Structures are given as structure tokens and as C-alpha cells.
Image (spheres, coloured by chain):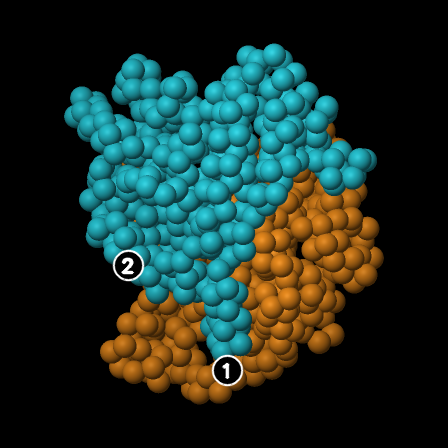
Chain colours: A cyan, B orange
Amino acid sequence: MISKFYKDMTGKESVIRQFFDYSRQRAAELGPDSVYNFSIGNPSVPAPDEFGKAIIDLVENGDPVSLHGYSPTLGLNSTKQAIADSLNKRFGMNYEAQHIFPTSGAAGALAHALRCVAGEGEVVITFAPYFPEYIPYVTGTGAELRVVPADITSFQINFEKFEEAMSKDVAAVLINSPNNPSGVVYTTETIQRLADILRKKEAEYGHEIFLITDEPYREIVFSGVDSPFVSKFYDNSICCYSYSKSISVPGERIGYMAVNPKAKDAEFLVPMAGQVSRFTGHNCPTALMQLAIEKVVDMTSDLSIYEKNAELLYNALTEIGYKCVKPLGTFYMFPQSPIPDANEFCWKAAKELGLIIVPGDSFECPGHFRISYCVPTELIEKAIPLFKAAYEMYQ
Amino acid sequence: MISKFYKDMTGKESVIRQFFDYSRQRAAELGPDSVYNFSIGNPSVPAPDEFGKAIIDLVENGDPVSLHGYSPTLGLNSTKQAIADSLNKRFGMNYEAQHIFPTSGAAGALAHALRCVAGEGEVVITFAPYFPEYIPYVTGTGAELRVVPADITSFQINFEKFEEAMSKDVAAVLINSPNNPSGVVYTTETIQRLADILRKKEAEYGHEIFLITDEPYREIVFSGVDSPFVSKFYDNSICCYSYSKSISVPGERIGYMAVNPKAKDAEFLVPMAGQVSRFTGHNCPTALMQLAIEKVVDMTSDLSIYEKNAELLYNALTEIGYKCVKPLGTFYMFPQSPIPDANEFCWKAAKELGLIIVPGDSFECPGHFRISYCVPTELIEKAIPLFKAAYEMYQ
């Protein structure tokens, strides 16, 4: 029968979506100049030229029957090998093609990785603030999502609360660094400590605990910031990646799951993901995108604008008086709201000033708001007086 | 923990896959000319030139940020409208853009449609012979797949067995016409009778029963054959389509789910599919493929070779002595095995003659074998003496 579960979900739009929709409505009513939209994480810089050139070259010179033909269930071997080679070269890993499973972006990678290592009656732990779609990704496996409260002084891990949250039924821990929404990058110390605790708990519980790393912002790290490759620190790990942000192709749904070659059952996890696909109807990403990515595997878009925007905005906000943990990567920052109710603050900023920012409640971190600064720098310059006005509404 | 369910599934390759793998192994050992591979359904004719041209045009002339940007969750409106217009024009339907949900091929469409209308404790009925992937598509929803035995005289529906199979917990019926593996097309009479029974049972059970139609072969119907558009006959229906076969792009994972505008809750079903996506990590098909399809929505590849091959092979086989229901579309036919054990027959044909065909057991229709004749016509001409030799092994 028509699923009550999914039907009840329709029409209940996420808060982020409500703000985004309000921005469109306001632009329609008052004109586009009345809106300063910092609500969504759509890359604002183009893909490297080589990406478009690779597509054109494939279509112009490939045999159409084989070019557009079925990809093998576990992905095109040449693409898998290119991804493995790139990771090995950059991070000193030992991936082979068999450890790489191309997916429809990080969403596909996470949905597959989580189903491989967690299910009914088990728990997946994540850390606030976190991307709200982790809820369906995790509950879709049958497992329960358990959230460790944020350390709002640094947005590193709140280890005390983490240890309290651990229990024998924890099958996996899901992290996101560089982080949406905080913009923070986990330090080597954070990752080392997390790995040590997980190894200790694996021994105590007598079963593996997988570390699933959501890394779509891996390439967006600012100058001088060290961004350790998490899988180097912990064997039972699966890295979930998307090219959406690094080469600005979020609509093309291309990413991968990379199984740590040292993980328990490493040789089974990609074939298992292939089995998961049969149940979800996911199949591979498109053959064309797999082949195009292979040609640009070591490239990124010109990501420098995000750092420039971060610096400009962070300096302005802290000068105004906002408290904010300094972003070290991504294109987000996550300041404290001038009043405890960030939801009220964000709606007031939207309606009175046209400043579209989203409350931290969606990320299970109330009292904060997220700014997505993947926008032209001029928009930030124009918006700074509005951030000031928003702050002053409550002084 | 590492999923026992998915792990146990790895390494147990489907019988079709085993035959395909044997064909590759034999080709490697004895040379490609020693293999006559009729095991898989990969289109053998190229996509229309306009498809490649559309891709090149989009990449050359589009703004890369918006071209490769996120598609809306429920698909690009222009693509949805183009698909609706095409269906309305061809089949006299009244689809609006809101009834169309672009998906990653028919697999994605079926996985979404089934989750919208069936779940735990419910039953989905299908008819042998059927595509083996229906098992994970259906069980992935939590529902049970119940199979009605084949009517081997015509491969239309065995209505007596169908009525016996009906029960109050049946949430949906899943059909595939033109059919893989039989090559048969359901007649108007078959569809009308099916629809009448479903309406009667809806009234009797007091709940809707959805008809899910798997239609990737809709465009491959031979001269003079009437192929009715199933959704015209039954309101509570969802049409699941893929461009894989009609324009020969199975690797590009593009298709759609079209909700009958007259269905119960028609306005909810596409938004519900959008919610399903969040749990499976499917998201939309790629933006580029949605936009490219929009340009070729009424085209097909030159599909005439399939009919030519069908006629040549069907005439030859029946002359040899095989019993076979005449294929009316697709690129499959499904003759009776000369011995009851089609598995034995197919392995013997493979190993002694290099003739790669697959046993009907996989399609829950033993005693038959499937021939995929999406191959060059010369391969069929060369293989006819082998089909004769295979037949004569058992006379």
C-alpha cells in the first residue's frame, strides 16, 4: 500500500530548504538585489576546463556502443585504478582497483558503506554539528544514529561525551572533516585520539568498529592547514568521497567509496557494495562520468576564492562582535547566534534584511548559524553591513 | 558489524553471469571465434548521433557552474516536461511534469516505485518468466515477491494461477512487457483482463493495488505488433522506463518513473520517491544526462536489426525442431530446451560448441533457454549450424 512512512515525510521540508525557498520568493517579490543568499553549498567556481574537454573527447572519439555501454557492476577498472593511484601517490596508501567502488557522489558512497557495516539493532555514532542527511543514510540501513554533542569551543571531537556514547552495539562511527557546517578540519591529534579509542573499544567489545569518513571537502583546505588522511590512522575505515565540490560537478553524481586495504574483510567490502546496489537500484555512476573523472583525477577547480571569502568574512564578523571558530577549509563557517534561538535570529535576518543564513538546529547544534560562502566575493562585501545590522538588532 | 547478509551474497554469481564469464574464459583460451555469445542484453546498435551532439553542445555552450550544478531533488523541470509531453503525444495520456521522476535507469525507477507502494508484511506479485533482479528490487522494500507460474504456451498471463496467487496483502503487481526473456508483448486482451481483475480485487480487499510496469523494451516492438500503453488501462499504475535499450545508452543510467495522473495520491508519489532517494543515496540521475535526454526524447536508435535477427533466428530454430513462442519485440527469445534440464543443455552447448545461451531456471521458468540476439546478424548466421548441432545432441 502507499507507504505512510514516505508519504508523511513529503511536504515537511528541511529548514535549510525553507530558507532557500524564502530567498527565491523574496527575490521574485523584491528583486534579486534584495537577497543575500548564503544558504546552500553549491560550488561557485567552474569545473576545470579539462573536465569538459574530456567529455567532448570521449563522445567525439569513442565508439558509442562501448562508450555508453554498461559499466561493470563494481565500476570501470581503469577508473578504479586511476583513483587508487591518485590516493596512493598523495597519501602514501596502498589501494588497489579492487578497493575502489565508484558511486553516485558521496551520498551513494555513504549509503553503500553504511549498509556494508551496520544494520538492524546496531548503532552508528556521529558528532554534532553534522550534515542532516546522515539521518536517512543511517536509518536506511536499519541502524540507529546516535549523536555526540558538539565541542562548541573548537568543533573538534568532544571526547568525554564520545566515550560516554560508546556501547557494544556501535558498529560504525561516521565523521566529516573538513566539516560541514563548522568549516573546521580535524587535527592529527583529534584523529589519533579517535583511532586509539576505537581500537581500544574494538578489543573491549570483541568486534570491529568501522570508521566511515565523509570527505567531499577534502580538497578545500586553507593555506598552512594540515588535513590528515584519516584512513592512514585506522585500518577498519572506508573513505567516502565526491568530486562535487573539488571540481564543481555536484549535478554529475560522481564519487567513490575507498576501502582501507588493511580493513577486516577488505576484499569483500566492494563486492558487498555491489550487492547493496541491487537492492537500492543504485547501480554504477554513469560510464561517461567515470571515464571523464579518470582524466582529471588529480585536478581541482580554482578553489582559492573560498579561502579569500573565508578570511574576509571571518575578519568582518569577529570585528562586528560575532563569536566564531575560525574555518580552516570547506566553504562554510558556523558562528554563534547573538541570541540563543538561532532559528529566530535567522528568520529575522531573512525577513528584515534579506540575509539568508541557516540555523544550527538542523545540524543538531543550536545557538549557531551556518554561512555558505561559496558566492562571489562582491556579495560578501555587500553583505557585511547586513551582518552588522543583524548583530545590532540584539545589542 | 560487517553485514552477513551482503557478505554471504558475494561470490555467488548469477547463472547468467557464470555463462558470460565462461564465454570470456573460452575466448581467452581458444580465441574469440570459438565463442558465439548470446548471453547478455547489451544493445548492439549505436545511440542516435543527436545524443552525442546534444552532450557536446551542452558542454561547449553551457555555463559549467549551472550545467554541472545540482539538479533539483525531483529532477530538472524541463526534462520532466519533455518526457511528459512525449508520453502524452504518443499515448494520449495527461502527464504533467510533476508526475515524472527521472531515475538512474529502470533499476532506479523500480526501486523507487516499489518502495512508494509496498513494504514489510506485504506482497508484490510478478509473472514467470521474469528478470531475476526483481528479487532484490522487491525484497529491498521489505515486501515478499510472489511468482505466478508461466503460461508456457503463449507467455501471456496465466490468469488462473494469478487469481489463486492473489491475497489481501498484495500491494502491487509488477509486469514487464515487451518481456525479457520471452520476447512476448502483452496483448490488449491480456492487459484489459489483468486490469479488470485488479479493480475487482481492489474493491474486494478495500485498498489500492498498484500496477508497476517495467518498460525498458517499449520501443522494441516488431512490425504489425500492437503494444498497448499499459497505464491507459489502469489508474493505479506507475510506468518505469529506461533509455538504455531504446537509444542504446545502458551505461548512462537514465530513465524515469511516470506516475499515472489518475492514480490514488498521484500528487504525492513523485515527492515520496524523492524521500526514498534520501535513504538509498540514489539522488537524481546526472544533470548532463537529464539535459541530453531532453533533446532526444522522441528518438530511438535504428532498432531494425533486432527484428531482422529475430526473424532469421526464429525461422531457423523452428525449422531445426525447437519449440519456441514467437518473439514480438525486445531482443530476446525463449525456446524450449530439447531436454527438461535446460541447465545441462546450456552448459553442454557452451562447452562442446561455444554456444553461449542461458537456462530459463534463472527466470523461474525451467525447461527453456534465453537467446539474446542483440548481436551482428552474421553471428546469428554462423551460429545456426551450432543451434542445429546442439539440438541433435539429444535426438
Density class for disc 2 (Cα within 10 Å; few <14, some 14-19, many ≥20) is: many
Q: Quadrant of residue A351?
A: top right
Relative to B311, say whether B106 is above or below: above
The residue at which mark 1 appears reads as B376
Query: Height in image: B199 above or below B175?
Result: above
Rendered residue at 71%/76% (across/down)? B223
- Residue B200 percent across, percent down from the top left: 75, 38
Chain label for disc 2:
A
In the rendered image, residue A114, in percent from the top left (x then y), is placed at 38, 37
Quadrant location, the C terminus of chain A: top right
Horizontal placement of B380 versus B270: left or right?
Answer: left
Q: Which residue is drawn at 45% across and 39% down?
A: A330
Q: Between residue B303 and residue A182, name the one nearer to us.
A: A182
Looking at the rendered structure, the secondary structure element under dot 1 is loop
- The image shows residue A332 at horizontal and vertical percentages of 49, 35
Residue bearing mark 2: A85
**Element carrying mark 2:** helix
Q: In this view, does B274 lie above or below B300?
A: above
Residue B285 x, y percent position in the rendering: 57, 52
Amino acid type for the residue under numbered disc 1:
Pro
Tell me the residue at 56%/48% (across/down).
A44
Q: What residue type is labelled 2?
A: Asp
The quadrant where residue A153 appears: top left
Left or right for A383, reference A30:
left
The residue depicted at 41 percent of the width and 75 percent of the height is B37
Mark nearer the viewer, 1 or 2: 2
Q: How far apart are marks 1 and 2 (CA)?
A: 38 Å
Depth check: give the residue in front, A300 or B210.
A300
Q: Nearer the viewer, residue A284 or A31?
A: A31
The chain that hosts pointer 1 is B
